[in-house]
Image: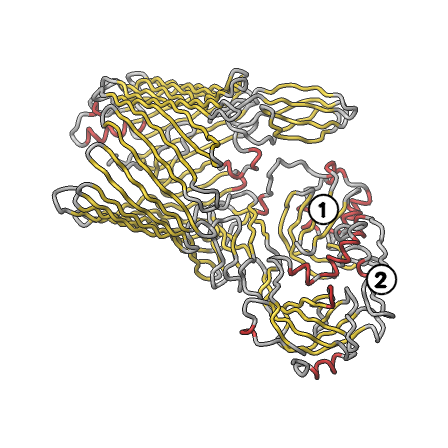
Amino acid sequence: MRTREYSSRPRAGTWFALRRSHAVMLGALAAWGATPAFAESTMLADVQFNSEFLMKPKGQSVDVSRFARGNPVQPGEYTVDLYVNGNWVGHDTLRFAAREGAGNAVPCFSKALIERLGLDYSTLSDKGRAELAKAQAGECANLADLVDGASQAFDLSDLRLDLSIPQAALLRNPQGYVSSEFWDEGVTSATLGYNLNSFRVTGSGSAGSSNTQTYLGLNSGVNVGSWHFRQNSALTWQSNGPRTYQNIATYVQHDLPSIRSQLTLGDAFTDGAVFDSIGIRGVELASDDRMLPDSLRGYAPLIRGIALTNARVSVTQNGNKLYETTVAPGAFEINDLYATGYGGNLLVTVTEADGSQHSFSVPYASVAQLLRPGITRFNVAAGQLRDAQVNQHDNLLQGTVQHGFNNVITGYAGTIVADGYLAGLLGAAVNTPLGAVALDVTEARANIRGVTNTTGQSVRISYSKLVPATNTNFTVAAYRYSSSGFWALRDAMLARNAVAGGQDPSAVDRQRNQIQLTMNQTFGNGWGNAYVVGSTLDYWNRGGTTTQFQIGYNNVLRALGTNFSYNVSLSRQRDGLTGQMNNQLFASVSIPLGAGQHAPTLSTSFTHSNQSGSSGQAMLNGSAGVDNEFTYGVTANHAPGSSTGGVNAQYRSPYATLAASASGGSGYSQVSAGVTGAIVAHPGGVSFANDLGDTIGVVEAKDAKGARITNSSGVRVDSLGYAVIPYLTPYSLNTVEIDPKGIPLDVEFKSTSQQVAPRANSVVMIHFGTVTGRAAVISARLPNGAPLPFGATVYDAKGQSVGAIGQNSRIFVRGVADGGALTVKWGDAADERCAFGYQLPPKREDRGAYAHIDAVCGAANQEAASAAAGGNAQ
């Protein structure tokens, strides 16, 4: 037997098809009548193959009956992703059992599995109830008997079980719904995120002076079950100054899914939805909207209508289809429409079975205070005020509640009780055809020594509207007026702090009028976008008005084979203390220098100010690497009396991010260097990462060093078989995919996609099963030189199937020993099998390709082949 290198390696992920060539070549034909696996369940007809069409030596036959009903599934346990009508409902290990008279094993529907399906038991037939009773008694139930019209299909290559169940037999859940029983609380773990940066400037002060400032930020955590401890701190030191340490936050958090909320003990911030957000040290219980399905987050109206027949209902907004479903005759309700931002009326079209249509419009505009009908949000916090500018940490209690009563009105209220301070708020948000409006009034009374006028009111009104006819979007328009005796909580505490320090409390600025506006105008047809942003603010205790105003326009122009993006803006700022006005004109253009993936971009900008004159800047930015892990930039600036230049670079490795910069100008120079990253300790060991986020996943893929996580840029499996995925979305379905390209030849993945729904702040383990073993291509022929029958199955010494005869009598095998014996079988008769011994070349000779050996298949019994193993190598 000769040995040589086989350099034509299959593409990543395709070896599975080669290994199961019987499933791909013959099973694909069976798919015409039985796709993908369960002909028994789907009641599809048998497909009979004529083996005479297969290339084989004259006089031989091949038993292909096992392909008559699609890809054969053997009894046993399979870890599968379970889908119901295309929606993922879990990842679990299921038992597949053989049924009498069936060619394939079928899944055993246990009581626990049936509960996952979300069946409406009231719709089951008598036969279905009897099948359900079997499952509840610990026996295996059959889906087709359980639910009339249900079917199943198992994709063995993707380990995916698809169930098709009539909608009438299911309980209706909102879009994006993931049952809380599938929320993964994660594993016991410890995390540490760090950010270290050192910045050195020379010559910016007195001649020859220099100063180095270093910052270290730490974000650490420990998870035990569903309890999560977090500590954020910062350490700063400089060569010409003191060293300072700041404890930013320390708290323990625990989620309470039963009431859709988070319990926080320690340092927390109120949400700011009703009152202004404040820091508190104590206990907080607050709603967590992330526990709602995606389609119930944010505001969208409830849609009600009537269908005369089995009808199709579609919902569009400004010509874009947002939703479509089929409804039964009678009244229908749509309450799981995804939120689409700040508005645009909804057009609901009902298409009856006979093709007739009728439509109606539903007003849709939103402000932050609006909630869906029936949704309640609350926040209760008790403890001490936590503010770095206030020395006195007074006790306080704050509570807020919001409730969506219907499509039109959301009511909200709140109260603050603190030492020497009391406030109450009452308000409502309204969705109208003319836009969304929120109005609330706050009454507050403060006790501040030396101040007599400390009782007053504050009125706030906000508005949002999209005008479809002109594509004008008033995203934020708000006005607040506070009376002379109104003190906000923080202002009152600052004033009391000033009194305690012997200062005048009237020095604390108190707002009188505040106006905010943000408007966007889209012109369409390639004409770009204009925007206006502005605010004005004045105070009771000092004169002058602080004003900020900006108007701008941006667009993308196609010319000379590339896209030029440009922006022009005019801004005005007025300082309320000095009355000084600053007008500024800004213009910028960005031009890609090439069409490749890593083509750099040249950006130039011009600024003119009535205070500082004119200045210009040019920047060249680019990236390199498969994952754009290298980024760089070069800048040059020119302003009246000075010119500066600088460079910066960053390398984002799978384990940390390194950054450096340098710049210089007239009389000064600057250099900096930094590193950011994270460390995660988990049951499998310690892993390094670039980022964390509050919810993370740890991929476990043994022996798959170098495999890339496709949905997390730059993340790869390390030498220990782990990779950290940051920023998972809590309480939602996250799909994690792994790319096997680049892994060792002797490693394969059992599956390359997993799904997980983590709880907030958790560290979840995501296991990708791997199989390790030598892989080779064997060219085997009969003693007379004839090819082996196409489609014949190849077994190892343990009787396990390791491949099938493919084209040109080649076999692709994986997971085999370096030497041994293989048996080829294409029928039940004694002369319909053969065996051969083999010996693979040393692994060091693989050189990045599969080993390729030749073999003669002649020994009819396994013992003779085993005795010959190793002796046939040439």
Residue 91 visible here: yes
Is residue 121 shown left or right of residue 615? right
* Pointer 2 residue: 51
In the rendered structure, which amino acid carries the disc numbered 2? Ser
Q: Nearer the viewer, residue 792 or 261?
A: 792
* Pointer 1 residue: 163
Is residue 282 shown left or right of residue 848? left
Mark 1 Cα-neighbour bin, 10 Å: few <14, some 14–19, many ≥20: some
- The image position of residue 20, as x and y in percent, is 71, 61
> Which of disc 2 and disc 1 is earlier in sequence?
2
Q: Nearer the viewer, residue 766 or 818?
A: 818
Residue 235 visible here: no
Q: CA distance from mark 1 to mark 2?
A: 33 Å
- For the view shown, which residue lies furthest in the right direction? 59
Image: 787 above or below 732: below
| Quarter the C terminus occupies | bottom right
Image: 794 above or below 693: below
